[in-house]
Image: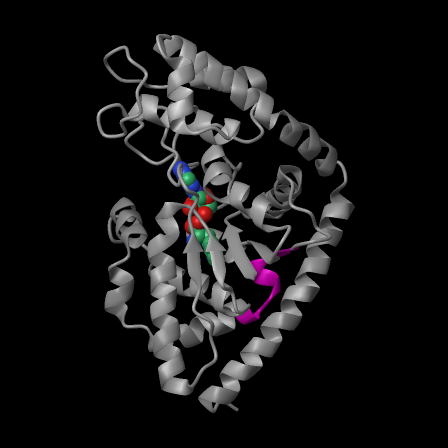
Amino acid sequence: MRIFSGIQPTGNLHIGNYLGAIKQWLDLQHENDCIFCIVDLHAITTSYDKELFRKEILDQAASYLAAGLDPEKVIIFVQSRVKEHTELCWILNTITPLGELYRMTQYKEKSEKYKNSESAGILNYPLLMAADILLYDTEIVPVGEDQRQHIELTREIVRRFNSKYGEVFVSPKEKLPSKGARIMSLSDPKKKMSKSDGKESYISLFDSPEEIKKKTKAAVTDTGKTIKYNPSRKPGISNLLTIYSLLANKRIEEVEKEMKGKSYKALKEETGDLIVKELHPFRKKRRELLSREVYVEEVLKRGEEKAATLAESKMGEVKKKMGLW
Ligand code: AMP
Ligand code: TRP
């Protein structure tokens, strides 16, 4: 199966990205044809630091590798290096009704934040994402729950394009993790964990053990005493149980049983300890990779060449079907 996914190179990856997306990538890479992209063109739709950007992209590539993606098996590349992404994005613009873009939850959330001074890029963001996916005949897109609507839109685009111009695109399906598709903020467990919020609200894959313990200790929990999974009534405790169960590869009920009779404080400490333990190899490997910049650049270069070959061929097909010169 052809798999495609991407993450923006903005700041550190957090455990939400890991449990929601990357952990699935690691499982999928063995048996499938995988492409993982660093979506820098998506990242520039919000403010970013142009002096730091190159370093952040390299850092993201090092993080992908440190998390365990095998560059011998998968393609890792930077979106803006393959020009067909923007080219196809324009074409998709011409067949997508504006109403469908205005309807997107992520657009609504972001435009609220910008108070109607948002760029057209924020609105057209899902079309660039659809182009990413469609250029490679992607069948499966492993992402967190928040991206589901964008994949649904991509299927709509496939339907519309194929019926207008003839069969060119493959219809993709999202693959969400079984649970924990949404890891919540540590400081406000009713909100999704996000790197655009304060540092105390998320745990980066590369935080030090001290930072991790401090953040989990300070995690906002709920009233009451019993450790029970109930996201609507006990969002804080449920979030910790989810993180614990995903990292330990145990079912929530099993974790509940283990924690029975223990205090909230104990749950926080044990979750902190488990996160420290599970993330230790990532930290070590990333440190090593960051000192091997040339190697990481080489991985990206190789990925780019492979991706470009596939993308050029697909774009040729698209233009031909559309009667473009
Ligand atoms: P982003 O950081 O928004 O670019 O998201 C990158 C990937 O991580 C996407 O597949 C998201 O669905 C996933 N993701 C981001 N935040 C979370 C979260 N709090 N819980 C689960 N998955 C997430
Ligand atoms: N839009 C995704 C996000 O915000 C990132 C992304 C861009 C992506 N292109 C993609 C994810 C293609 C999957 C497939 O998280």
Q: Is residue 55 above or below residue 202?
A: below
Kindly identify the residue that appears in the image at 28 percent across and 47 percent down: 109
| Residue shown at the point (28%, 31%) measured from the top left | 190
The location of residue 162, given as percent across then percent down, is: 40, 80
Q: Is residue 117 left or right of residue 314?
A: left
Q: Where is the N terminus found, in terms of image quarters? A: bottom right
Q: Nearer the viewer, residue 272 or 200?
A: 272
* Point 57% across, 55% down: residue: 37
Name the spot of residue 27 as percent of width and height, x first: 58, 45
Rendering quarter of residue 74 = bottom right
- Residue displayed at 45% across by 25% down: 244
Asked if residue 80 is among those painted magenta in the image, a careful observer would answer yes
Residue 235: x and y in percent read 28, 26
Q: Is residue 85 left or right of residue 293?
A: left
- Of residue 322 and residue 200, the one placed in the foreground of this image is 322
- 162 in relation to 77, above or below: below
Residue 218 in view here: no
Any magenta on residue 159? no
Q: Which residues are magenta?
A: 75-84
Residue 127, position as x, y percentages in the image: 40, 65
176 or 106: nearer the eye? 176
